Image (cartoon, rainbow, N blue to C red):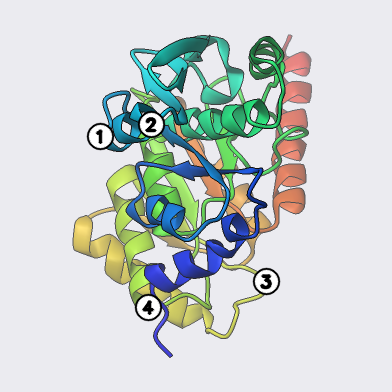
Amino acid sequence: MAYTIEKLAKVKSVVPETVKESGYAVLNADDDLVYAMRERVKCKIALFSMYSGSARIEQHCSKGGIAAVYENGFMLLRIGNQLLPIEEVSNVPVTFGGKAEFNIANALAATLAAYTTGIRLNTIRKSLRSFVPSAETTPGRLNVYEFGDFTVILDYAHNPHGVRALGKFIKSFEGKRKVGVITGVGDRRDEDIIALGEESARIFDEIIIRHDQDMRGRTVEEVENLLTKGIVKINANIPLTYSLAECESVDYAIEHATEKTLIVVLTDDIESVSACIQKHQQKAKVQLLKAV
């Protein structure tokens, strides 16, 4: 059986299709497959877009529809032709000052989900301002650990699209050598694992290939070969290191970190890897105190 993104979208459309007629489905107007879900739902629709001038948003709101859009550093709620300010993204911690564009989109969607269920805009605004991403509040989602001379980011991105979106955020860390700790998911298609390698090669200056405890039907060699195929297609000269265990790879990356390095760990075992990073962070603090 051939698995395609179109079939995946059909499966995921089951969620909005189950919404009652009185409810709302919040859909991404910037994604063709998600936008098309509006044709199969029985409920009302709210759209969000990273483009305030989106033709889809214009058409939707011209009929009195509700939408949320991003424009010039601001999140805006649109009801018909009426525009209401939601918040400036620089005041929304989860967007990291607007650098994490995918989280701007997530915040737009969350705003619509809250607003269409009757939560007041002022309450939504306060929530957006006060929600701070961290290993505790958003485990595995852009968890940033500062080590003084270098930085570690932990994220659950595990497909080409996720890595591509994360890449825009990573590139905002100018002047840093970017090291990626990556792997491929065994139960994905060959082309998906290769594409993940390609996206990684576009982002990182050095790559460490590690492996999940559960290989999901593939051998270590298969995953390594597919990732490497994608990486060398984009950059044949990129330094590659092969490692077995997830935490061992993190240990290696941190122990070999130099000044102005950004280490990005694409993780599967969030809890264990987070504990591993925090162990190194605590060790660094102890060494700093001893030096003082």
> Amino acid type of disc 4?
Asp
Report helix, strand or loop for mark 1: helix
What residue is pinned by disc 3?
213
What residue is pinned by disc 1?
55
Q: Would residue 236 be visible to someone looking at this image?
A: no
> Amino acid type of disc 3?
Gln
Q: Quadrant where the N terminus lies?
A: bottom left
Confirm or deny contact between disc 4 and disc 2 (CB under 8 A). no
Task: In the rendered structure, find residue 212 and report the number of the disc placed on it.
Answer: none
From the viewer's perspective, tell me whether residue 240 is left or right of residue 91: left
| Snapshot quadrant of residue 117 | top right
The image position of residue 278, as x and y in percent, is 74, 36
Task: In the rendered structure, find residue 63 and report the number of the disc placed on it.
Answer: 2
Distance CA(mark 3)–CA(mark 2): 52 Å
Q: Mark 4 or mark 2, which is nearer to you?
A: 2
The image position of residue 90, as x and y in percent, is 50, 11
> Amino acid type of disc 2?
Lys
Q: Mark 4 or mark 1, which is nearer the start of the sequence?
A: 1
Confirm or deny contact between disc 1 and disc 4 (CB under 8 A). no
Q: Mark 2 or mark 1, which is nearer the start of the sequence?
A: 1
The image position of residue 246, as x and y in percent, is 63, 59
Report helix, strand or loop for mark 2: loop
Q: Mark 1 or mark 2, which is nearer to you?
A: 2
Compared with 40, 80 (above or below) is above
What residue is pinned by disc 4?
190
Distance CA(mark 1)–CA(mark 4): 36 Å
Q: Mark 2 or mark 3, which is nearer the start of the sequence?
A: 2
Neighbours of disc 2 within 10 Å: few (<14), some (14-19), many (20+): few
| Snapshot quadrant of residue 280 | top right
Q: Mark 3 or mark 4, which is nearer the start of the sequence?
A: 4
Neighbours of disc 1 within 10 Å: few (<14), some (14-19), many (20+): few
Confirm or deny contact between disc 1 and disc 2 (CB under 8 A). no
